[in-house]
């Protein structure tokens, strides 16, 4: 019988598989170690509230559909950095002390944080400043956290994008059009590359590889020579215009967010050729979809391992997936070795061998 008490929080953008991870953490902690498990609401925001906004998890919590559901039932926040929270009048306030006090008021033996590189960086600093005992589980549809082959949520996003290409193929063929699918990926092109291969794209544009409109047109012309009048183009939101500028939307809140590179490509192709283009931007559908089997499995395996780390008092570690097993590495390794698509990635070679256009000098 243990009297240990642990906390869980989800931080940053949500994704498929977060609920599966929370469920797995609860079952391991309860069934193996008889720990008390608390879910903190809305990421670090729950630790700022007084009383701290947390719920004790029990078997009934997971009796239903949660394993299958996208998002995070605990809530999350990606509203910036708690060291510098905007107050709305152009000023900022530092809430880090409140978070640290909130953590200690719960008398936890450790906290499992499920987040991407940004969240891990923030939580790592809070842990250092405030002697918080943390273990991290990597999640991000972008799959750009270093030191792990996969992060929770990536497979689900790839699956959603692949299904979108499947649906676009028939209508592209019916109308002899170029269908452009814009997918997420703030700095990395993993979703576009993986879904592009799985969904039979003819052209994959990712921020790591330079493309040209001329190169795209050449590829479309080549297809025409083979009597193929329609095409599928997948483009990651972080791809830049030919002149190197980023394409962003300005929102009502004054923030600029990535979006619109698909429209740019369409406009250029329609301006320079007689190709008829249509654009689909997938957006948050990639984040909210029910998790795929592989994300549920990854999340479950990560959850179990993370609890074992806490139980062994191995703090400041991140769980990682390597060679079909879970291992652990220093959190810093996950943060510092940011993972882009590299030229030597075997999927780049795969795409090229399939005749997919990725760029000119490749
Ligand atoms: O990092 C994950 C991600 O989904 C990116 O792919 C995307 O650019 C961003 O988050 C969107 O964030 P928000 O939830 O603020 O719209």
Image (cartoon, rainbow, N blue to C red):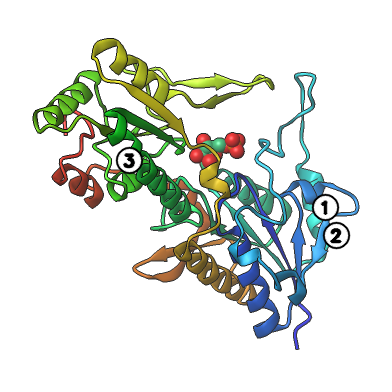
- Indicate the position of residue 252 as horizontal and vertical percent values: 68, 20
Q: Which mark is residue 118?
A: none
Q: Residue farthest to the top?
A: 271
In the rendered image, the vertical position of residue 278 relative to residue 157, given as above or below: above
Q: Are marks 2 and 1 in contact (CB under 8 Å)?
A: yes
Q: Quadrant of ligand 1?
A: top right
Measuring 58% from the left and 48% from the top, which residue is drawn there? 288
Distance of label 2 from label 1 (alpha carbons) = 6 Å
Q: Is residue 310 left or right of residue 335?
A: right
In the rendered image, the vertical position of residue 253 relative to residue 198, given as above or below: above
Measuring 49% from the left and 26% from the top, which residue is drawn there? 259
Q: Which residue is mark 1?
A: 101
- Indicate the position of residue 298 as horizontal and vertical percent values: 48, 66
Q: Are marks 3 and 2 in contact (CB under 8 Å)?
A: no
Q: Which residue is mark 3?
A: 170
Q: Is residue 38 left or right of residue 295?
A: right
Q: Quadrant of the N terminus?
A: bottom right
Q: Earlier in the sequence, mark 1 or mark 3?
A: 1
Looking at the rendered image, the disc whose residue lies closer to the viewer, 1 or 3, is 3
Q: Which residue is mark 2?
A: 105
Measuring 35% from the left and 20% from the top, which residue is drawn there? 266
Distance of label 3 from label 2 (alpha carbons) = 57 Å
């Amino acid at each position: 019988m243990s009297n240990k008490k642990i906390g869980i929080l989800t931080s940053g953008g949500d994704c498929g598989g977060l609920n599966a991870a929370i469920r797995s953490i609860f079952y391991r902690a309860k069934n193996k170690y008889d720990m008390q498990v608390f879910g903190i609401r809305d990421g670090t925001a729950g630790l700022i509230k007084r009383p701290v906004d947390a719920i004790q998890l029990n078997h009934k919590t997971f009796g239903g559909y949660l394993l299958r559901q996208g998002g995070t039932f605990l809530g999350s926040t990606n509203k910036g950095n708690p060291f510098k929270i905007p107050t709305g009048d152009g000023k900022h306030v530092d809430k880090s002390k409140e978070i640290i006090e909130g953590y200690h008021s719960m008398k936890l033996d450790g906290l499992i944080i499920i987040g991407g590189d940004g969240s891990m960086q923030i939580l790592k600093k809070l842990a250092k400043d405030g002697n918080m005992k943390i273990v991290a589980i990597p999640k991000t549809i972008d799959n750009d956290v270093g030191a792990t082959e996969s992060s929770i949520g990536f497979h689900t996003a790839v699956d959603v994008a692949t299904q979108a290409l499947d649906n676009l193929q028939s209508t592209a063929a019916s109308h002899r059009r170029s269908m452009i699918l814009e997918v997420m990926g703030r700095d990395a092109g993993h979703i576009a590359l993986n879904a592009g291969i799985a969904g039979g794209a003819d052209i994959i544009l990712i921020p790591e590889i330079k493309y040209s409109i001329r190169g795209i047109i050449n590829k479309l012309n080549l297809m025409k020579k083979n009597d193929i009048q329609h095409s599928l183009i997948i483009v990651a939101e972080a791809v830049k215009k030919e002149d190197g500028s980023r394409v962003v939307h300005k929102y009502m809140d004054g923030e600029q967010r990535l979006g619109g590179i698909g429209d740019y490509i369409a406009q250029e192709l329609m301006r320079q050729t007689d190709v008829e283009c249509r654009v689909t931007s997938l957006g948050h559908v990639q984040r909210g979809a029910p998790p795929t089997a592989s994300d549920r499995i990854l999340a479950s395996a990560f959850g179990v391992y993370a609890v074992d780390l806490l139980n062994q008092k191995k703090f400041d570690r991140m769980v990682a997936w390597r060679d079909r097993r879970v291992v652990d590495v220093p959190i810093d390794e996950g943060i510092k070795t940011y993972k882009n698509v590299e030229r030597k990635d075997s999927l780049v070679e795969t795409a090229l061998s399939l005749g997919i256009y990725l760029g000119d000098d490749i």
